[in-house]
Image (spheres, rainbow, N blue to C red):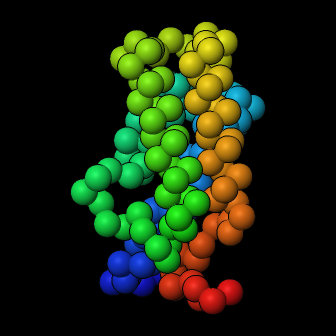
Amino acid sequence: MSDNPSAQVIGQRIRNRIVEHLKLTSSFEEQRAYQSAVPYVSVPNEVISQWEDWGPSPEDSVFTQPVFTLAEQEAMAVFQRVWEEVVAATPKELPQLEDVLVLPEWKRLRDEAAKALGVFMARGMLPEDHEFDRRS
């Protein structure tokens, strides 16, 4: 990987982290596997915190075309709204994973993540070492 990547390559890397986050959030099985692999980590808190790390914020200009399609931008905006509602409706320190998985809010977050993931997977992961060809 380049020591001095372009803004587009940085955007592509961020997009890939968002795809990875949506994969985790959209799958209770992946969340359970993560919890099993790292039992000392609170997976529910990780799911919430990772979106804070990678999700869009109003001052970010990286979440634009060509890296993020209009459909992906809209999917992120919808997911962001649901994420905010889930954060507001659940405790700051979430319970154990198995207790969280039964919450209607967590199921709603999973379902919205699955929808957003479907939008992102239309193009799949983007290269992290060079700018992708926008024409392909």
For the image, the number of numbered tags is: 0
Q: Nearer the viewer, residue 84 or 97?
A: 84
Residue 126 in view (yes/no):
yes
The residue at 29%/52% (across/down) is: 58
User: What x and y, as percent, mark residue 62?
Assistant: 36, 67
Residue 93 vertical position relative to residue 30 in the rendered view, above or below: above
Residue 113, placed above or below residue 119 = above
Q: Residue at x 31, y 66 (%)?
A: 61
Q: Residue furthest right?
A: 29
Q: Is residue 26 left or right of residue 69?
A: right
**Foreground pick, 118 / 71:** 71
Quarter of the image where the C terminus is located: bottom right
- Give how far across and how far down residue 113 sits, in percent: 62, 40
Figure check: 78 above or below 107: below
Q: Position of residue 55 (x, y in %)?
A: 42, 49
Task: Specify whether residue 34 is in view.
Answer: no
Which residue occupies the foreground of this view, 75 or 41? 75
Residue at the (32%, 50%) spot, across then down: 57
User: Which of the 4 image quadrants contains residue 124?
Assistant: bottom right
Spot the residue most to the left: 59
Instruction: Report the side of 26 relative to 51 (left or right).
Output: right
Q: Quadrant of residue 33?
A: top right
Q: Position of residue 56 (x, y in %)?
A: 38, 52
- Given residues 39 and 4, the one toward you in this image is 4
Q: Residue at x 62, y 48 (%)?
A: 116
